[in-house]
Image: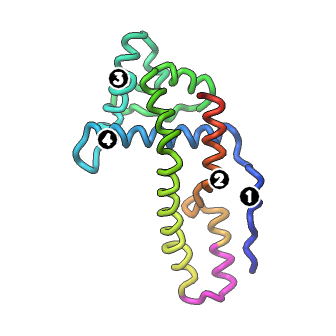
């Protein structure tokens, strides 16, 4: 059985998908920055990290500007439900988020200085683990068994737990597009 190759010249990801990818990775990077600044333990409760993230970037700015807290997807009744995963990531949402200068500065600094380096390290680990755990375990007993190879190919294509991460080229393209649109 021959594994089909992917045409590397084609970028089939939608613009919104690329923006969501970049935004979520940048938020995760900024949360790690906050974690290093304010917490000494390696493991921190998500709720505590979210509270500190909100406080650091948005609390003072929201009070000064009397902005609507819901625009930042923070449930005012329960701080623990704070989230930066809005129903729709679109130009309006990004524009609203980038009105906060400290957030915008740190966000784009992360993208320019750390995003690709961090992403490359992450996908190297993920692919090594993927090959070791998923593929070798399936093919170990009888590597020439076409049915097992077909199974592995089918899993890669259909199973979300076997999803291969974005390529460095796709991530770079998405980053450039995001910076062009919003910076």
Of the numbered discs 4 and 3, the one sitting upstream in the chain is 4
Mark 1–mark 3 contact, CB under 8 Å?
Answer: no
Task: From the image, state whether disc 1 or disc 3 is nearer to you.
Answer: 1
Q: Residues within 10 Å of mark 2 (few under 14, many from 20)?
A: few
Label 4 vs label 3: CA separation? 24 Å
Of the numbered discs 1 and 3, the one sitting upstream in the chain is 1
Residue at (56%, 75%) from the top-left corner?
135
Q: Disc 2 marks which residue?
A: 169
Q: Disc 4 marks which residue?
A: 35
* Most foreground residue, 120 or 45: 120
Where does the image place residue 94, in percent across and percent down from the top left?
A: 56, 27
Label 2 vs label 1: CA separation? 9 Å
**Membership of 80 in magenta stretch:** no
Of the numbered discs 2 and 1, the one sitting upstream in the chain is 1
Q: Which residues are magenta?
A: 141-152
Classify 30 as above or below 165.
Answer: above
Q: Disc 3 marks which residue?
A: 77
Q: Left or right: 37 with respect to 112?
A: left
Q: Disc 1 marks which residue?
A: 8
Label 2 vs label 3: CA separation? 42 Å
Task: Kindly indicate the quadrant of the structure image that contains residue 163.
Answer: bottom right
Q: Secondary structure at mark 3?
A: loop
Label 1 vs label 4: CA separation? 37 Å
Quadrant of the frame with the N terminus = bottom right
Q: Secondary structure at mark 1?
A: loop
Mark 4–mark 3 contact, CB under 8 Å?
Answer: no
């Amino acid at each position: 059985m021959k594994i089909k190759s992917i045409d590397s010249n084609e970028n089939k990801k939608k613009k919104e998908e690329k923006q969501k990818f970049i935004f979520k990775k940048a938020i995760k990077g900024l949360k790690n920055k906050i974690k290093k600044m304010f917490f000494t333990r390696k493991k921190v409760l998500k709720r505590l990290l979210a509270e500190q993230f909100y406080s650091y970037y948005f609390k003072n700015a929201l009070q000064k500007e009397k902005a609507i807290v819901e625009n930042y997807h923070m449930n005012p009744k329960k701080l623990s439900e704070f989230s930066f995963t809005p129903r729709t990531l679109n130009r309006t949402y990004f524009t609203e988020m980038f009105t906060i200068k400290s957030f915008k500065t740190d966000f784009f600094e992360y993208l320019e200085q750390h995003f690709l380096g961090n992403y490359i390290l992450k996908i190297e680990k993920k692919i090594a683990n993927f090959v070791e755990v998923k593929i070798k375990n399936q093919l170990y007993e009888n590597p020439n068994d076409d049915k097992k190879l077909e199974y592995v190919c089918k899993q890669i294509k259909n199973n979300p737990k076997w999803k291969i991460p974005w390529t460095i080229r796709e991530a770079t393209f998405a980053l450039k597009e995001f910076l062009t649109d919003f910076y």
